[in-house]
Amino acid sequence: MSEVDWLSHLLRIVTVTGQLEVRCAYGAPWRVTWDQAAANEIPYHVIVSGRAILEDPQTRTTQELAGGDIVLLPHGAAHVLHDGSGKKPIRTHEHRGSAGWVLSENDGKGEKLDLMCGRFFIEPPHDRLIRNYMPAHLVTQARNRHGEDQGGSAPAQLASLVSLMRMESAGDRPGGRAILDALSSALFTLVLRASSEGEQAPAGLLALAGHPRLAPAIAALFADPAKSWKLPDLADMCGMSRATFMRHFQDKLGCSALDLLTDLRVSLAANELKKPAISTEAVAEIAGYQSVSAFRRVFTERMGMTPGEWRRQAQHRT
């Protein structure tokens, strides 16, 4: 794994799985509502073809989506998708295939929509890490609407992945559920890659990772969170003064580099504590703490429970 591959390092700490749940084939007017997701769930929607309006009932904001757009909601916020007409939606009828996902259709005669909906599952406590550093809504384009050749770009790869998901969900073939779940997991990674490489990366970690001058520091922190990093070292890596580095980092992420490092260490420690044979002292060392008491204090502050309490909870879940 390359040391500069921050995304692979992140997904080595944070386990994410995906699941396609609903394939929607609607004619306008239509409307679908989703409640607030569970803490460890991130809903996603893929506009295969057609057009949709994404509405946030809490902020009363809307965003128009078109074919090729992929929406992730990292904070799991309640939301609505509709055709934008304001008309009463036509009643839908559902059919569940053997692969586990549901085909939802209506008899609407208006503009057609082909939509795939699912969710990503993040193992606790890493939902905290994702939600703290990702925007509430993340919209990525899976293909170029202007028709230029994108070659091996992330949007082109996303378009190929969505095409595979569409083909697999169009039938009811052996292994379909396993294939769709695997493709959904890959979708999460490709969306983050495309967002961080885009010209206008969203606020938070993706903007930081896509920043040409700050990216080396992000890559270093993710590659080796246990290292005793100092701010001057990180600033030198980015060719900045300590004050300039701190200001740019805070502006992009909303917190300091040491805050991010602490969250990475706590997530790393949470993974290790799931192993019954490893001692708390050994976990503290793996996570970069020379003092067990300092590790216990930081872990308890971030997690709201002691390392021992987390270990017992994690063992009870398995």
Image (tube, rainbow, N blue to C red):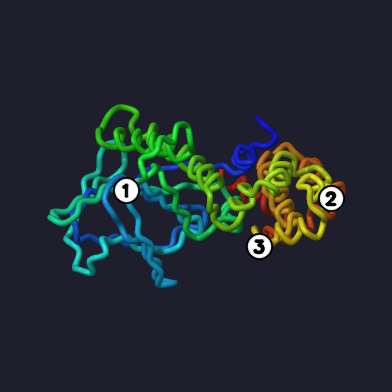
User: Do tag 1 and tag 2 residues touch (Cβ < 8 Å)?
Assistant: no
Between label 3 and label 1, give the one nearer the viewer.
Answer: 1
Task: Return the x and y of residue 208 as percentages of the image width and height.
Answer: 64, 52
Distance from label 1 to label 2 (Cα)?
46 Å
**Disc 3/disc 1 C-alpha distance (Å):** 32 Å
Residue 37 at what x, y percent from top left? 44, 58
Nearer to the camera, 142 or 87: 142
Q: Nearer the viewer, residue 72 or 146?
A: 146
Give the residue at the far top of this rendering.
Answer: 174
Nearer-N-terminus badge (3/2): 2
Please give left or right for residue 296 compared with residue 270 in the image: right
Name the disc covering residue 230, or none: 2
Q: Nearer the viewer, mark 1 or mark 2?
A: 1
Residue 241, above or below 60? above
Which of marks 2 and 1 precedes in the sequence? 1
Please tell me whether mark 3 sits on a helix, a strand or a loop.
Answer: loop
Q: Which residue is mark 1?
A: 67
Which amino acid type is shown beneath numbered disc 3?
A: Gly
- Disc 3 crowd rating (10 Å Cα; few below 14, some 14-19, many 20+) is some
Amino acid type of disc 2?
Lys
Residue occupied by mark 3: 254
| Residue depicted at 75% across the width and 38% down the height | 278
Near mark 1 (Cα within 10 A), the count class, few <14, some 14-19 or many ≥20, is some
Number of other residues with Cα within 10 Å of mark 2, as a class: few under 14, some 14 to 19, many 20 or more: few
Q: Position of residue 192 (x, y in %)?
A: 52, 45
Furthest residue in direction right, as rendered? 291
The N terminus lies in quadrant: top right
Q: Nearer the viewer, residue 287 or 142?
A: 142
The residue under the point 17% across, 60% down is 91
Image-based side of 260 in relation to 36, left or right: right
Q: Quadrant of residue 58?
A: bottom left
